[in-house]
Every structure is written in structure tokens, then in C-alpha cells.
Image (cartoon, rainbow, N blue to C red):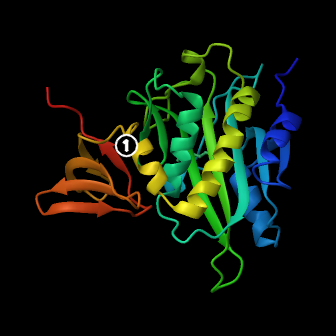
Amino acid sequence: MPAPWFEDEIAQSLAPVLPGIGVEVVAEIGSTNTELMRRAREGHNAAVLLVAERQTAGRGRLGRPWQSAQDAREPSSLTFSLGLSLAPRDWSGLSLAVGVSVAESLDPSGAAGLGLKWPNDLWVGERKLGGILIETALFQPDVAERYLVIGIGINIGAREAANLSTPPAWLKEWRPGATPGEVLREIAAPLVRDVLLFSGSGFVPFAARFAARDVLRGREVRLSDGTEGHCEGVGWGGELLVRTAAGVQMISSAEVSVRPRPAPI
Ligand code: BTN
């Protein structure tokens, strides 16, 4: 029997946090983010959690594809998107706040070593457990409110490293019985709560929580634009702080990726 998705339980846990939010589970879709962005462009702005057992055209940051772990017998990835209308004063740091929320739900004590790699990767050691893709659709120019789509992909079961730029980690390594539905049930309500907290208060309430899991802080890093330096953590707006020969640079561009530099042998 396929593992349950707990739609009703999840809907009940979300109702007091964000009344009216829907929960939809589909067997297969191109990409949950693409679908919610398509709906938003057609004028649908209802809050929804859209979950897919399989994505055929999953997308990652910087135009990269997102491939789920494959296992014909059971879904071995959690892939979903949360869509809702939001009008925070400042959007900067949102993807970091989302990462904090998910990491704290999956590894509350930090015992599993679940860390956050700026701006939005979930890492265990030097391996990637999951990623976050945030997109927004503007309803009307000059209106602060946007439709926000937060897409999250988490490896639940084992997956091969072939074709991945960062070797994968998976949740079953430390929780052998984990299922995607059970994981979604754990992270959904805290995620919506944290997104609403971000909307009201920005990144500030998440700064120390991010710092506690920041895998780049204190390391030498190399950015995709060629900049190299010493990572000094993130600023109050979620910018990556990199000390270079020219001083501390505040990196906020969504187009930049960063990697820790291997330690010299
Ligand atoms: C990244 O690591 O670059 C971000 C990966 C985000 C993947 C998730 S899976 C659910 C949602 N739908 C998508 O097409 N992408 C996101």
C-alpha cells in the first residue's frame, strides 16, 4: 500500500495558521512551482499547498533541473510548493527564513547536523538534502502584494550522485522509516507560521537561527562570479558577507552561487 499523505491532518494543522488554505496531492505533474505560477498568472491567488508524488520537469535555482530520487516502489522524495499572497515590507532573506523553518522541523536539536548553505540549500555535512526555489508573481504594478510560490524538494530515500553537482544526502540515513507524507506533516504548519512571521517582521527573527546552522560561516568561499574570500556569515537582510581583499562584500544577488573552497592539502 502506498504511504499516506495525511492531507486531512495537514489541512487541519494549517487551518488555524492560515484559514482557507487548501491541500492538494497529485500523482504526477511537471513542476509544482510551474503549476502555481501558471495559476497565479491566470489570476488565482488562493493559498494552497500543492504536493506531487512525481515531478517530470522539476526546476531548481539558476535554471537548473531538479531531479527527484527515483524508486518505483515508493515515493522517495518530498516535492511540494506553498502558494500564498504576501506583502512583506522587504522580501530579502525570505529563502533563508524558509530554510531555517524546514531545518528546525526536520532536525530540531541539530543532532543530525542539518545545516543551511546560503541562500537556500539544506546540507548534511558537504552533501545536499534538499533545496528551495522561491518565485513571485506580481498582480498589479504598484501593489505591494505578490503571489509567493515556495517550492521545496527533499530527498527522503537514497539517491545516486550521478549528474549532481553536490553529492546527495537523504533523510532515511538518520530516520530509516521516514515517508514523504510524514515529513510534510511535520514541516507544513511551522513553515506557514514562519512565512507569516517573516511577512510581519522580516529576516531579523531568523538571523540567529540561520547563524546556528550556517555551513559557510568561517570558511573560505568562491562565488560563481569569481569572487573569493572568507565568509563572515549573513547580514540582517540575509546577504552573504564575504571578506575579500577589497573589504567585506554583501552578496544578495539571486544569480550568484557560492561554494566552500576545499581545504588545502
Ligand atoms: C534548488 O536546490 O535549486 C531548488 C530545488 C527546488 C525543488 C522544488 S521540488 C518542488 C518545487 N517544484 C519545482 O519544480 N521545484 C521545487
The x, y position of residue 161, in whole percent, is: 49, 27
Q: Does dot 1 land on a helix, a strand or a loop?
A: helix
Residue most toward the left? 245
- Figure quadrant of residue 141: bottom right
The answer to whether the residue bearing label 1 lies less than 8 angstroms from the nearest atom of ligand 1 is no
Residue located 84% across and 31% down the image = 6
- Quarter holding the C terminus is top left
Tell me which residue sits at (76%, 29%) in the image: 181
Residue 11 in the image: state x and y as whole percent: 84, 42
Residue 93 position within the rendered picture, expressed as x and y whole percent measured from the top left? 47, 58
Q: Please name whichever residue, 2 or 236, is drawn nearer the observer in this view of the structure.
A: 236
Q: How many residues crowd around disc 1 within 10 Å: few (fewer than 14), some, or many (20 or more)?
A: some
- Counting from the top left corner in percent of width and height, residue 182 is at 74, 27
**Residue 55, image quadrant:** top right
Residue 229 is left or right of residue 137, and the answer is: left
**Is residue 185 or residue 180 the one in the foreground?**
185
- Residue drawn where x is 33% and y is 43% of the image: 259
Q: Residue farthest to the top?
A: 176
Residue at 83 percent across and 54 percent down: it is 19
Q: Which quadrant holds the N terminus?
A: top right
Q: Disc 1 marks which amino acid? A: Ala
Q: Nearer the viewer, residue 26 or 210?
A: 210
Is 222 on the left or on the right of 66, as rendered?
A: left
Number of callouts: 1
Q: In the image, is 21 to the left or to the right of 162? A: right
Left or right of 187, for residue 237:
left
- Res. 241 visible in picture: yes
Q: Is residue 27 above or below residue 224?
A: above
Residue 119 visible, this orientation: no
Residue where numbered disc 1 is placed: 211
